[in-house]
Image: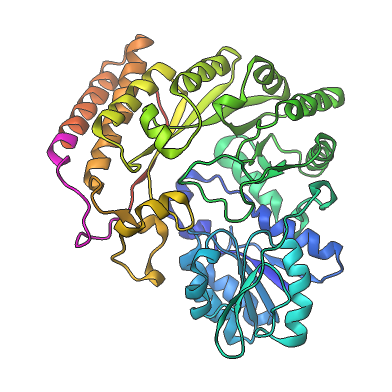
Amino acid sequence: MDILLTHGYFIAEDAHEQKVMKPYPPLGVLYISSHLKAKGFHVDVFDTTFSTREQQNEYVRRTRPSIVGIYTNLMTKLNVLPFIQMCKSVGAHVILGGPEPPHYAEQFLDAGADVVVIGEGEVTLEHLIPTLHKVGPHRLHEIEGIVFRDEDGKTVKTPTRSQIKPLDDQPFPDREAIDLDKYVETWRTHHGRGSVSLITARGCPYTCKWCSHTVYGNTHRRRSPENVLAEMESIIERYDPDQVWYADDVFTIHRSWTLKYAALLKERGIVKPFECISRADRLDQDVVDALKGMGCYRVWIGAESGSQRVLDLMSRRTTIEDVQDKTHMLQRAGIETGMFIMLGYEGEEISDIEATVDHLKKSNPDVFLTTVAYPIKGTPYYNEVESRVIETMTWQDRTDRDLTVAGRHSKRFYSFATRWMVNEVALDKMLKRKERNVKRIVKAAVNARIGRIGMSLTKKELESAPAGRGQLHTENIANG
């Protein structure tokens, strides 16, 4: 074995994810696996999604890999840290990749990692693995796109590696390296539809200040419609899913690409139900009609706020009116709409939250998800508030989700704000459709009132450095 690839997501150890039960395979790891195998490397993949930490540890003790590559993000960091030491105990060199390690490279190296990969991992690992075997972990100066420590213990960051082009030359993800059938059946068991995910592009050129672009950057590199069609046909032939999830940051970003891909699917007679993410400004009637013809049943839009002032602060480059218009356009075509809403962004006032509630009433999305903003290191948002970031836990014990910002409303305030928003919008929806269930109406009205009163009582509570953990509230909401 040249390298063991793995990650740190354990659904069996995450109570929230067990309730949701929508597992997604680690496409990033599977892309690296297929790339390395195409280059002649012997690659093993240990997929942790349906496993446990002890099973992962036992696998490493038994196989004793010489190199372990671990995909790491802020959700899995706390599982990855002890696993690094496990790998070191059997003599393995440890390589970390993903969106989290580059911005905390020093800390991850202190925790035992030998190398941190910055950006895409395929080509970097292709050059890194043989060099690491040959000269060890301290003489890697010729490998682009990494951070490591030299023989004197000095941290070295090598020049940035160029991004992969063209993407059509890359093999499809190595789905056969994991038990993908279990993912499909888990979706089918819990949601009635077996699902498989795929991506058609890498990178996002938009400038939303809170969004991390660490791995794929701010560019946009898209596979050809023919290449994606070939992958779709292989997925259908091998796994026969009931639906697919296009996991692109903005699936409809390129209008002519979307229309051509839709035409190719139509030629092949492929109509596979799916959901995807889009921006409102990347939709028009032709694109919406094409999505419907392809089988799209839900489009998620990053609305984020109903206040144009806040959207501009976020550098969203979109308008409230356009989001509302495109939401209605999708619904007229028979496509459900989902929205992402973010509370607590820098500069947001109570009037902006009120505007967001009004926006949700006017847009009337079928579902929306709310979160409270947290500063992810490496983003413009983090840089803007860095001097006021509250960090009351040690780095080893927290993630960026546990960070908050001094001077912002308290966690209790946003809990009440979310309660008001969810129930106020639900109440409006029930009244518009002349809901006859009086208990539901009364319950929503009471909860909306409690939320509003709670906001008033806690509006003077501000986050401050001596406060508690400052852990941020995230809640999934399904309306009506």
Task: Write down the quadrant of residue 268 in the picture.
Answer: top right
User: Split into 4 quadrants, where in the image is the N terminus?
Assistant: bottom right
Residue 173 percent coordinates (x, y) = 76, 52
Q: Vertically, is 421 above or below 325?
A: below
- Residue 141 rendering spot, x and y as whole percentages: 69, 79
Say how the picture is coloured. rainbow
The part of the chain drawn in magenta is: 455-471
Query: Percent x, y for residue 267?
Result: 86, 23
Image location (x, y in percent) of residue 339: 47, 30
The quadrant where residue 442 appears:
top left
User: In percent of the image, x 60 and y 42: which residue is there?
Assistant: 187
Left or right of 249? Residue 339 is left
Locate the C terminus by quadrant. top left
Query: Relative to the observer, which residue lies in front, 61 or 382?
Result: 382
Which residue does the image show at 64% across and 59% down from the upper left? 119
Task: Report the side of 413 relative to 133 (left or right).
Answer: left
Q: Is residue 306 above or below residue 112?
A: above
- Can residue 2 be seen at all in this image of the molecule? no
Task: Check residue 461 for magenta coloring.
Answer: yes
Q: Nearer the viewer, residue 291 or 108?
A: 108
For residue 439, side relative to residue 381 (left or right): left
The residue furthest bottom is 152
Question: Relative to residue 377, is residue 411 depicted above or below?
Answer: above
Instruction: State the predominant SS element of the stretch in magenta.
Output: loop
Magenta region includes residue 69: no
- Report whether residue 445 is seen: yes
